[in-house]
Amino acid sequence: MIGVEVGVFFVGAFCVAATFGSAVRTVILPRAVPSKITRRVFRVMRALFDLRVGPRAPFERRDRILALYAPLSLLVLILTWELILLGGYTAMFWANGVRPWSEAFHFSGSSLLTLGFDRPPDIPNTALAFSEAAFGLLILALLIAYLPTIYGLFSRREQFVTFLEVRADSPPSSSMMLRRFWILGRPKDRLEDLWQRAETWFADLAESHVSFPALVFFRSPEPEHSWVTAAGTVLDAASLVASTIDRPRDPDTELCIRSGFLALRRIASFFGIAFDPDPASTDPISITREEYDRVCAELEGSGVPLKVDRDQAWRDFAGWRVNYDTVLLGLALLTAAPYAQWSSDRSPPGARSGLALTRKRLRARM
């Protein structure tokens, strides 16, 4: 019997330690360390949302339902931590002599919620009650601190997405943004400001969306907005400027592209999206030459000066795009991003929702 009690006690202690470790990895640790509890909660919640959305729902319905996915999953995660603590301490109280199981459950619930309606009978159980109350308050404090942090980072991300809408329309288009800059005049000054601001945004994106991966699934307030399509629009515009538009070479443009694809790769790596870290400039991309030529015709029609050697310009554009092509499309599917040129519109037929892919990615890491 003593062996059974010892075993039950250690099972309960393991549950408590696992919960504490999950909370630390998810909320406190400022690096990409996945938590099994967090991952499983998000997987189960995603499966429930998949059932609610259905495979053929129109995008408006899908976006409206998926907007609740990340916030509700975070709240369920907090509840899951509390329930595991409750179960773990119930096992430890039982192993420590509090019988029957119902009485051990009463002691655990009273301690976790700091209600105090049951008084432990001895010093060892009193120590357990104190530690459970401390853990319960810690989880509550983490919730109070975590949610404002999440929404602060979300707001900062969305400021740039809204800023880009003014320049690139909604849904965003790299072609429209460049044409508008040339129509308004002084494109050099406007583009330099955009690249510098975008580089800062990409750096912030890489840090925040890996440290707090739930942010990846927080959808923009406007259905047609998305941080993924905004990133793709900026990167495509910078790639067109670096490869196709006839103007002096600008280091800020190329640094913006590098900052962008490094950020997207870091986020993609966390979710297990496969990509080639060192692609060749001749590797295939999802953009066809015909699509590229159509955009060039639009730019030329708006007075944007283009390089004479269009074949070389296409090769240069593909050489830039190959650095972020795979991760951009993967993240667009993962987040069920709204339609946008050269990003979410690359999704295969029947997969625009990204639901099946999301389940697969969440099985990998969270």
Image (cartoon, rainbow, N blue to C red):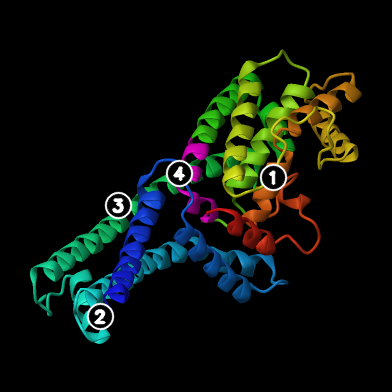
Disc 2 target residue: 105
User: Which of these two is toward me, 103 or 263?
Assistant: 103
Residue at image point 59% right, 20% down: 189
Q: Secondary structure at mark 4?
A: helix
Disc 3 target residue: 145
How far from the left and from the top, in percent, is residue 249?
A: 70, 14
Boundaries of the magenta span: 204-220
Task: Name which residue type carries label 1.
Answer: Ala
Q: Measure the C-alpha gap from mark 4 to mark 1.
A: 20 Å
Disc 4 target residue: 211
User: Which of these two is toward me, 72 or 342?
Assistant: 72
Q: Earlier in the sequence, mark 3 or mark 1?
A: 3
Q: Is residue 296 above or below residue 326?
A: above
Q: Is residue 96 above or below residue 30?
A: below
Disc 1 target residue: 274
How far from the left and from the top, in percent, is residue 12?
A: 32, 68
Q: Earlier in the sequence, mark 4 or mark 3?
A: 3
The reply to whether callout 4 and callout 2 are in contact (CB within 8 Å) is: no
Whether residue 267 sits left or right of residue 15 in the image: it is right
Is residue 191 part of the magenta span, yes or no? Answer: no
Task: Name which residue type carries label 3.
Answer: Ala
Number of residues whose C-alpha sits closer than 10 Å to that of mark 2, classed few (under 14), some (14–19) or many (20 or more): many
Task: Name which residue type carries label 4.
Answer: Ser
